[in-house]
Amino acid sequence: MARIVVVGGGYGGVTVAKGLDPLADVVLVEQKDQFVHHAAALRAAVDDVWEHTVFMPYSNLLERGRVVQGTVSRVEGTTVHVFGQDPIEADYVVLASGSSYPFPAKYSSSRTVVAKARLEQLHENLAAAHSVLLVGGGTVGIELTGELANAFPDLDITIVEKADSILSTPGYTDELRSEMARQLDELGVRVLTGSELAYLPPYNVGELGRFTVHTKAGEAVEGDLWFQCYGARANTGYLDGTDYAGLLHPDGTIRVGANLLLEGHRDVYAIGDITDVRESKRADAARQQARVVIANISHQLEGGAPDVTYQPTKEWVILPLGPNLGASQLVDEQGETRILGPDQTAEIKGTDLMVSVIRSQLNLP
């Protein structure tokens, strides 16, 4: 039976592993001891109950295959090397190692108990704080603002964004920006656009400590806590110094063909945040790419060609501002872009944050 090693147990990785489990000997290698539902991480940053909800075990994911907790040190050909363990030989490798991002949007620790302890400390710090600074007015900064404002309505919140508008990344409409700006104003959030900090606060992210910083224009911003809401980075360091290093871009993403095979290869795929597919890095996109890889490897196992190609999907933006506010930018069947308001956004994502969907995928009750 063919062996398939999947590197990374995020949204794309678990989809591939589960989809190919009936067809091959699947080994999922994941650094963390539990699945982390990052789409709900910002609510976990302010809510004691959600602190536990975002962590889910891998124990029920695979019926035939296995999950190996470990850190991949390098991939040579189709051999996956894991620190402290024997190399895993494979017929096919799927790279799905995702990206890193500053706390609390993502957690660096591989141990759930450590991540939970850091969240508990953050909850204590937020309860004692009077004002918070968020550096970055993209989707993470705005979504975290909504969670903070809902959980701590008396908290003074300031967003500093160096671009001339919030949501400055291409792809967002002016209508969405205007609607989110209106809701932020309604919450009493101070938004400084076209403002870059001259220096960062002298404390770690999420650490309690009074500070004053200045923008390059000289405007003062005070706070008791601050968060860095920018700085995503593809997790592909384990490919440095390997035969695959030449396929890496400076930002850490890797070149893939339309069928999601690494360029020049027939047995190594990549999906999710680490690919150079020109679209926003979203969980639903990673799952769609995973389905393409499942189809292609299935064809190859039957002696066929990996001829299924990935077409970037319509960019849907679901942006909660806490459980009750937010806005969404959707593309309808006619190709027209529509903006949905708070009620519809909460219905799509704001209340449940897709937890039930993920638990079902992991075969959890």
Image (spheres, rainbow, N blue to C red):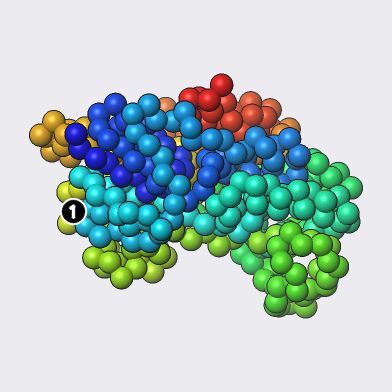
Tell me the residue at 33%/57% (across/down): 81
Q: Position of residue 45 (x, y in %)?
A: 71, 47
For disc 1, the marked residue is 265
Residue 77 visible in image: yes
Q: Quadrant of the N terminus?
A: top left
**Looking at the picture, which amino acid does disc 1 mark?**
His
Q: Quadrant of the C terminus?
A: top right
Residue 106 against residue 24 in the figure, above or below: below
Q: Image check: 351 left or right of 316? A: right
Figure label count: 1
Q: In terms of secondary structure, where does tag 1 sit?
A: loop
Q: Position of residue 142 (x, y in %)?
A: 67, 49
Tell me the residue at 42%/27% (across/down): 333
Residue 339 visible in image: no
Residue 116 against residue 22 in the figure, above or below: below
Crowding near the residue tagged with mark 1, few <14, some 14–19, many ≥20 C-alpha atoms within 10 Å: few
Q: Quadrant of residue 210?
A: bottom right
